[in-house]
Amino acid sequence: MLEGIALPRGRGRIALPDERPKGLAEPLYIQNRTVDNIHFYMDLFIPRRLSDPDADALGLVNTMLTETLHSRILGEARERGLVYGMSSNYLQTKCATNWWFGSQVTAENAPALFAIIAKELRSVRDGEITQTDISAAQQYMLGRFQRSGQTVGGTASGYTGRYFFEDIVDDYFGTPERIKAVTSDRIVSVANEFFSAKRMGLGFLGTAPKDLREHLRSLLEL
């Protein structure tokens, strides 16, 4: 269908630079006294793009950690009244992959939230993942995938995920089997690649004293 649309071919793509991520020696801090809460992002990097099985595994572990009200990080944090929401995902550039976690939290609640994040990331690192965890996350991902095809934007996003970097159009109808194929071994393997790379960045926006920022950073040492 797409091949039948008469579009100009253009002059080709602009070559993108080879970006090599490095870790931050200390957290980035942007002070804004008008912002009461602390907005933060933690980023982990590896210097390569993910294979399909690795991308599927990382997507599933994000679901397990932050995407539902029963997820390991967000579920406990909400139950304890620490935050209302939290996100995690991964982003791929030409030569690297970024796995990130972010939210906003009060200064009072921040240490407890960071302790939960660190605890659950260590659990993933150490392979403390049950088949029940995986099955629940797979069911959620399958439902989300089925819903995504109900809109034009969702369908376009599904097809263009890798196209702009690799000239590859994903097999949209093969996605359910890819989700079902994720294993705990694959999750632990790709997660530990991020942890062992030691290319981490942590950033804060709002009002966070230096001693608090340093304490929060120390809690995330995996």
Image (cartoon, rainbow, N blue to C red):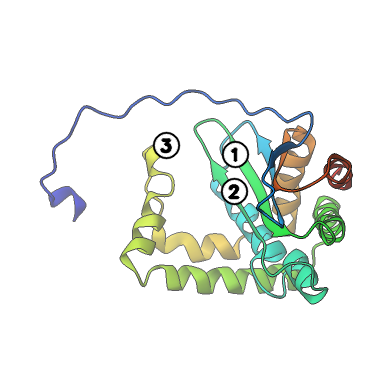
x and y percentages locating residue 6 in the rendered image: 10, 46
Q: Residue type at mark 1?
A: Thr
What crowding class fits label 2: few (fewer than 14 Cα within 10 Å), some (14-19), or many (20 or more)?
some
What crowding class fits label 3: few (fewer than 14 Cα within 10 Å), some (14-19), or many (20 or more)?
some
State left or right for residue 112 relative to residue 96.
right
Residue displayed at 17% across by 35% down? 9
Residue 46 vertical position relative to residue 175 in the rendered view, above or below: above
**Numbered circle sitting on residue 97:** 1
Residue 20 vertical position relative to residue 124 in the rendered view, above or below: above
Q: Give the distance between the C-alpha atoms of the residues marked 1 and 2, in whole angstroms.
A: 7 Å
x and y percentages locating residue 137 in the rendered image: 65, 69
Q: Secondary structure at mark 1?
A: strand
State left or right for residue 121 relative to residue 215.
left
Residue extending furthest toward the left: 6
Q: Residue 138 appears in which quarter of the rendering?
A: bottom right
Q: Of marks 2 and 3, which one's residue comes earlier in the chain?
A: 2
Q: Give the distance between the C-alpha atoms of the residues marked 2 and 3, in whole angstroms.
A: 15 Å
Q: Residue type at mark 3?
A: Phe
Q: Secondary structure at mark 2?
A: strand
Q: Residue type at mark 2?
A: Tyr
Q: Of marks 1 and 2, which one's residue comes earlier in the chain?
A: 2
What crowding class fits label 1: few (fewer than 14 Cα within 10 Å), some (14-19), or many (20 or more)?
many
x and y percentages locating residue 90 in the rendered image: 59, 48
Which residue was labeled with disc 3? 165
- Tag 2 and tag 3, C-beta contact below 8 Å: no
Q: Give the distance between the C-alpha atoms of the residues marked 1 and 3, in whole angstroms.
A: 13 Å
Which residue was labeled with disc 2? 90
**Numbered circle sitting on residue 37:** none
